[in-house]
Amino acid sequence: MPPKPSKLIALTLEQRVEVIKKSEKDKLSVRKIAEHFEVGRTHIDGSLKRKAEVLADYGNNQPSDRKRQRKLAGNEDINMFFWKWFQDATARRINVSGPLIKEKALKFAEDFGIATFKASNGWLDSFRHRHNIVAGTLSGERGDVSDTAVEDWKSKLPVVCDGYAPKDIFNMDETGLFYRDTTKLTLKVKGDECAGGKRSKERLTVALCASMTGEKCVPLVIGKCKKPRCFKNITPESLPVTYTNNKKAWMNTGLFEWWLQRFNRKMRRQGRKVLLYERNSIRIDIKCERCMLIKHGPDQNA
């Protein structure tokens, strides 16, 4: 018989799920499970008797470190169906906010004919805590890439890269630099309104290219002005970047062809044949004797 605990020990939700697994899959007795978790048999029996509730809470993404089950204070139908809607919305990369949650919950209540339901801040906090929902920042565009496309590329990459040393495999991509923009975070006196103003949209486009071994090409910077005022006393050729311009400060077919020809000439001087991955929607039809161009992105027909 296991020693009697000196104090009452409550199992977390994750531990209660593990208890069920040890009982069903490992075929352990209640006594063995109680010895493993150092609790009494009654505690294990209770978790096994409430198996359906425990697994339902775990499947509904309740906090795994919760030690006591919490009962819904009514509105079970609304909470259940709304949780399914929330899962579907986040799976489709919809930006879900607090006001949107309240609006949708009220719509569910109207559909169920529950006139007494109020989508209060208290209900919202309870719903978020129950399903372990926290605030996050949507970053990048990873959500737009399908798993099928990723697996397809993973199978193709070794074949495409065959015959090229890591130093001869390059990746090129461009990004926007909003050089006059400011952070969205600020300090304020508690209770004062925190309203933002119009944000600067002035930008440069910066194209970066590097090899698998870390060899970096000179960055390409695209601006709107042919000769900005800050270049008054300097020559663009003396900069640690290659500067060029167009009307919108964007990468276009002409600029990319110009950059690619320069890159090709550089590889020719070094006597190298390289593989260049480039992510862009621009269609390129030129041939390069020293550079094999592989496009990955919206348009992969180059």
Image (tube, rainbow, N blue to C red):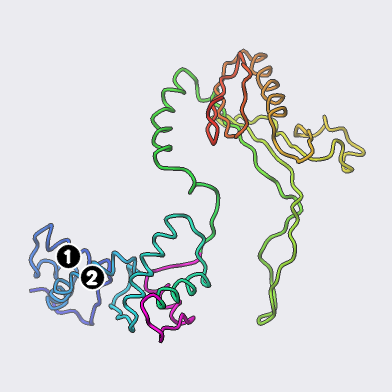
Question: Range of the magenta residues?
Answer: 111-135
Graded by Cα atoms within 10 Å as few (under 14), some (14 to 19) or many (20 or more), the crowding at tag 1 reads: many
Q: Residue placed at 76% from the left, 53% from the top?
A: 180
User: Which of 277 and 118 lies nearest the eye of the viewer?
Assistant: 118
- Helix, strand or loop under label 2: helix
Q: Looking at the picture, does residue 108 appear above or below residue 160?
A: below
Q: Residue placed at 41% from the left, 78% from the top?
A: 110
Q: Position of residue 37 (x, y in %)?
A: 19, 69
Q: Looking at the picture, does residue 59 appear above or below residue 241?
A: below
Graded by Cα atoms within 10 Å as few (under 14), some (14 to 19) or many (20 or more), the crowding at tag 2 reads: some
Left or right: residue 144 compared with residue 23: right
Spatial CA span between label 1 and label 2: 9 Å
Verify whether residue 217 appears in magenta. Answer: no
Mark 1 and 2 residues: CB-CB less than 8 Å, in contact? yes
Q: Position of residue 168 (x, y in %)?
A: 55, 22
Q: Which residue is mark 2?
A: 54
Q: Position of residue 67 (x, y in %)?
A: 29, 75
Mark toward the start of the polypeptide (1 vs 2): 1
Q: Residue placed at 69% from the left, 33% from the top?
A: 252
User: Which of 11 and 262 lies nearest the eye of the viewer?
Assistant: 262
Left or right: residue 250 compared with residue 170: right
Residue 133, quarter of the rendered image:
bottom left
User: Which of 127 and 173 lies nearest the eye of the viewer?
Assistant: 127
Which tag is nearer the camera, tag 1 or tag 2? Answer: 2
Left or right: residue 193 compared with residue 111: right
Verify whether residue 122 appears in magenta. Answer: yes
Which amino acid type corresponds to the residue marked 1 in the rendered image? Answer: Ile
Quadrant placement of the N terminus: bottom left
Q: Which residue is mark 1?
A: 20
